[in-house]
Each structure stands twice: as C-alpha cells, then as structure tokens.
Image (spheres, rainbow, N blue to C red):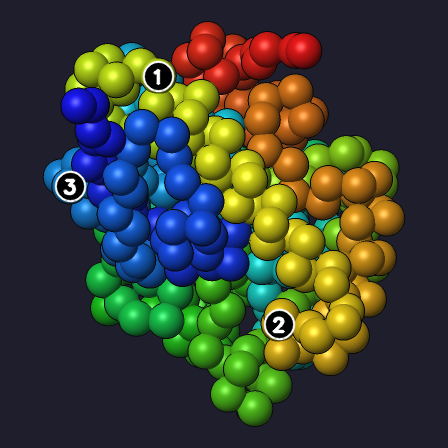
Amino acid sequence: MSRNIDLTLAINDSDQVRDLASGKVTVNGVDLRVTYHEVEEIFFRFTKFREWEISEMSLGKYCSLRGVGDDSVVGLPVFPSRAFRHSGIYVRADGPVDDPAALAGARIGFPEWTVTATVYQRALLQHEFGLDLTAIDWVQGGINAPGRIETLPVGLPDGITVRAERERSLNQMLIDGDLDAVIVPHTPDAATDGSRRVVQLFSDVRSVEEEYYRRTGIFPIMHVLVVRKDVFERYPWIGPNLVTAFTQAKDNSIARMLSGTAPHVPVPWGPTTAGIAADIFGGDMWPYGVEANRTTLEAFTTYAAEQRLTATKLAVADLFPASVLQSHVI
C-alpha cells in the first residue's frame, strides 16, 4: 500500500496557510507538517542550515543564490508575503515629509542589502524619485536593536559604499540625527511609541501606493516558497502539487476576507476594504503563478541586477522549474 511522504514546511503564521496547517486543504501525496516562526528566524535558519524541506524565503535572498549559480533550493511561484514599500520609508517628523527628492545625498539606513523590501525601496528612490544611489551615505544595521549582520555575501554596485553600524540601532541613529531616513520592512520603534518623533515619508501613503500600482502594475512580492533541491529531485511531482494546494488555501483565505456575513478578521470594514482591493486588482488581489506576476517579477529581477544582488538580470523562467511554468487545460 502506497503512503504519503512526510515533509516539513517552515512559514509565517498567516491566514493564507491556515487551511494547509489545519488539514482542510491537503497536498496530494504529502503529509505536511507546518512549523511557524517569524520570517527573520526562518530566513536565517534556512539560508544557513536548510533545516526544513520546504520553506518561506526572501525573494531577494533566493535571487542572490540563483545569481551565483547556487541551485540548492527550488523556487515555486507561491508568494505568501507581498507589500507596497513606500510605507516602509521613515524620516524624523521634522524631516522631508512628502519630499523624497530632499533625500538626495542623504544618510539612509537599511537592515540588509539583500532584504527584499529594501531592494524595492532603493528602486523607488532611484526610478520613481530620481535619486542617485551612489550619492547616498548607506548604513547597515539592526532596525530596533543593534548587531544585525548581512546573512549572505553582498556584492555592491560600482560607486556604492556601505558602512556597518554595530553599536546602535537604525531607529536610534534616526532619532539622534545621524540618519536622515531608513528603508525597512519593520516599523521603527519611534514611529509607534506615541512620541511622533519618526513618521512615514509619505503622509498619505495609501494614495501614493495605489497610484503606483495603477500606473506600473507592480505589486511587490516579498517572499517565495522554496523546496530543497535534494527533495525536489527525489519527488519532482511535489512542485505542481504544492502550488495547487497553496493556491487553494490562499483562495479560501481571500473568500474569508471578502465575506461580510460574519467577518473572519476583527477589523472594522474589513470585508468592505477587501472588496475595494479586489476591484483595484481586477479580481484575484493576491495572485500566485508566473504569468499573473510577470510584471512584478520582471521588475524585481531588473532591480536585483542593478543593485548587484545578481551579476546579470535573471530570466523569470530561470527562477522556477518547468513543471510549474504551465498547467494542463481541459
């Protein structure tokens, strides 16, 4: 009698994977054990030690590995985290609010060069706001605690210099006036402690991000699902099966978000807000798969090459195995 294979998935606890974790949605041929961790812990442990067979992974780190010919993990077009990143640019309250051009030549902090959010944010500074990245004084460090280091070796574009800060957090440096801005995936403490010392660069960031999407079609992808190569080679059929299951679980999650009969999320006007988002995105507001995300993937691989996460621009088709680039039609 045949039996399923046992695989462990490390992923952030989000509603998109709720039905996989509960067993309501199953992966054909797989008994999936789900282990939840914060994404920074997942990325660190999987990048360093490959502890799980399947993992959520930073798109930036995945492309960095691919860029140096490291194919030890196989990416699947499942994107459990995505977010517009204008909202992750912070300045002091007495700084250049709503004036990104004023950051020309500024001192800007970031947590790691390969953090996906910062790739998009540097691209915004360069392509949307016309800043010369080589003229910026870049500082790498921990967002709210000192001591963060780069997880992967970093190559920098010509003319870019970075100094590492190990004694103070970026949050503290911004408060102290030793940074003019930070580009981060997590909110600096001084933006949430009630002091209003630190604020978002854009005072109406929702409008800015919505206009950006309508104009560019880019909905930034942060994380990608990956499988260890040794597991994928042994069970090549798990790629499409995982994509199918993750897509079903995500679709179930979106249906819950849109349901207003008995709201599933304790957020006032949650279903109404979800409906507005669905209208803006034209149906599926969180698409998986390659073709539905080609515009965003092409943009990111361009930015990754410009910022030397990769030596050359990766082809989108090279990020994923052939078995998930197309599907059968009845």
Asked if 224 appears above or below 185 in the picture, the reply is: above
Q: Which residue is label 1 attached to?
A: 237
Secondary structure under the numbered disc 1 in the rendered image: loop
> Which amino acid type is shown beneath numbered disc 1?
Trp
> Which amino acid type is shown beneath numbered disc 3?
Glu
Q: Which of 66 and 325 is in front in this view?
A: 325
> Which amino acid type is shown beneath numbered disc 2?
Val
Q: Residue 323: name its quadrant.
A: top left
Mark 3 Cα shell of 10 Å, populated few (<14), some (14-19), many (≥20): some
Cα distance between the residues tagged 3 and 1: 21 Å
Does label 3 or label 1 sit earlier along the sequence?
Answer: 3
Secondary structure under the numbered disc 3 in the rendered image: loop
Count the marks: how many? 3
- Tell me the quadrant of the picture where the C terminus can be found: top right
Left or right, 320 with reference to 70? right
Dot 3 and dot 1 residues touching (CB under 8 Å):
no
Q: Which residue is label 3 attached to?
A: 51
Q: Which residue is label 2 attached to?
A: 265
Q: Which of 324 and 307 is in front in this view?
A: 324
Does label 3 or label 2 sit earlier along the sequence?
Answer: 3
Q: Residue 294: name its quadrant.
A: top right
Cα distance between the residues tagged 2 and 1: 35 Å
Q: Nearer the viewer, residue 171 or 8?
A: 8
Q: Where residue 211 appears, x then y in whole percent? A: 84, 48
Q: Where residue 222 appears, x then y in whole percent? A: 51, 43
Q: Which residue is drawn at 79% across and 34% down?
A: 216
Task: Give the farthest residue toward the bottom.
Answer: 194
Does label 2 or label 1 sit earlier along the sequence?
Answer: 1
Q: Nearer the viewer, mark 2 or mark 1?
A: 1
Q: Residue at x 84, y 57 (%)?
A: 276
Whether residue 70 is visible here, answered yes or no, is no
Secondary structure under the numbered disc 2 in the rendered image: loop
